[in-house]
Amino acid sequence: MSYPGKERGMDPNTYYLRTFGCQMNDHDSEHIAGLLEGMGLRRRARPDEAEVLVFNTCSIREKADRRLAAHLREAGHLKEDGPRLIVVAGCLAQSRKEGLVEDFPFVDVLVGPQSLHELPRLISERRATGRWTGAFHDETTHFSAELPRADIAGPTAWVQIMAGCSNYCTYCIVPYVRGPEASRPPLEIVREIEGLVTAGLREVTLLGQNVNAYGLEPGFSYGVTFPDLLELICEVEGIQRVRFLTSHPKDFSDRLIEVIAAPNQVCEQVHLPVQSGSDRVLAAMGRHYDRRTYLDLVARLRAAVPEVSLTTDIIVGFPGETEAEFEDTLSLVEEIRFDGAFTFIFSPRPGTAAARLPDRVPRDVAEQRLQRLVDLVQRVARERNQAWVGRTVEVLVERPSRQSPGEVMGRTRGYKPVNFVSKAPPGALVQVELLDATSTSFKGREIAGAGALGPAVSCPTPAGRRLEAAAQGRG
Ligand code: SAH
Ligand code: SF4
Ligand code: F3S
């Protein structure tokens, strides 16, 4: 990998930010950018142009570590050309700590995901002392959402409702790098969304590793559960769509199904990672549900919300997974007929329970299983999308198309991308006839443009007032 134009030189007081990993990391990066801009740094699109190079990292699978190593080595070469600062933020910084500086001695600042608020101090300290610095809190004391945020492009925004994870699925590193589950106070969430809507945003996606556990951790005193929170958010005037990620099947309640089914702004879309179709493997993964419970949950969800768009995550090649157990996963996918799935080969993460399990599945076997699974997932997803062709649906325009001038990209309530010719601006809700489908997207034809919506009237909402009164009562 090389960056053309290196000779053009870099601008002082600029930064480059590259993000890896999940939506939570994307969201954290908006706040990293906000903090750096608060320090007077301006963003640059290329690493060779910037003084401060920030990599917000992921540690979920080994491949993520390897990709980062290549980027860091390149950044190290850039540093030979002039004074630059290299910052490694996020989950890999937290999991490797000073080990990263041993491997990459040119790294200047390390900052874990629970310590992002310390970034300006760490950068100043590094500049003053010339020695590498780092911060790694184990628990959430500051939610990223409380930090300054860089401008959001488009009509949709992430909203963090929780940090951390306390589930300790045996394969997963997240609880070790993101700390225990912590829920944000509901009033802060509602206030943030009111602000976003006032600024013109139309859709929010609530973020947490297991949003269904919102408000359930010991010590959370607001008496608001996840379905309550969704109802409060729907009261924010002007909010058009509400989504959430990720749902853990073991905590998905019937009350949540009712809230999704109700005629409100909560979209008919659920990402419900199943991980495996085999009871033995699910137990070994520490998922706390079995195949039957998952099937029953999906049946209840589909009975209440027939058009729900259902996606999942699946791991193949978990230690000891037999051919028959893998076929249980295939048959589950056939039976449920997901709208899409993220599929992964098991990757042993240092420190997790599954990394110590015997009977690793050979790489070539796991790769063949992955391919069989991907083929099946794609066929089913294409068939499910094709069943929508001919229907007219509501689409929220997100942005101009990257490939075809004159076209825009928007999404259905089921979060499926639709490309169509339109003059409607981002944020407009339009009716679109679906003309053609692949396994992941649609081509459509605009029926009638609703145009951009007027500015939202907000602050304070009835929900906000109720929560404020409750907070005062407690105080
Ligand atoms: N909190 C979310 C997402 C966690 S990470 C959830 O529980 O669903 C996203 C996905 O990465 C997981 O759902 C899982 O399918 C996959 N994953 C996590 N750890 C992994 C590992 N060690 N090897 C392979 N895939 C993994
Ligand atoms: Fe990882 Fe499980 Fe937590 Fe998801 S719920 S982040 S898979 S430990
Ligand atoms: Fe996300 Fe990767 Fe961390 S998936 S929580 S950025 S380990």
Image (spheres, rainbow, N blue to C red):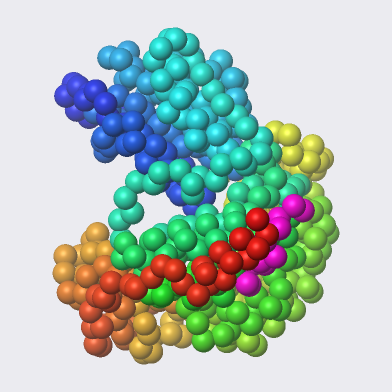
Q: Nearer the viewer, residue 174 or 35?
A: 35
The answer to which quarter of the image holds residue 449 is bottom left
Residue 279, image x, y percentages: 81, 63
Does residue 186 sit above or below 13 in this rendering? below
Q: Nearer the viewer, residue 294 or 320?
A: 294
Q: Quick check: 358 left or right of 378?
A: right
Q: Is residue 220 magenta?
A: yes
Does residue 424 sit above or below 178 in this rendering? below
Q: Quick check: 167 left or right of 240?
A: right
Residue 340 visible in the snapshot: no
The residue at 47%/61% (across/down) is 191
Image quarter where the C terminus lies is bottom right
The answer to which quarter of the image holds residue 106 is top left
Residue 345, image x, y percentages: 62, 49
> Magenta residues, as a range?
218-228
Magenta-drawn stretch, dominant element (helix, strand or loop):
loop
The residue at 64%/79% (across/down) is 257
Residue 92, image x, y percentages: 56, 33
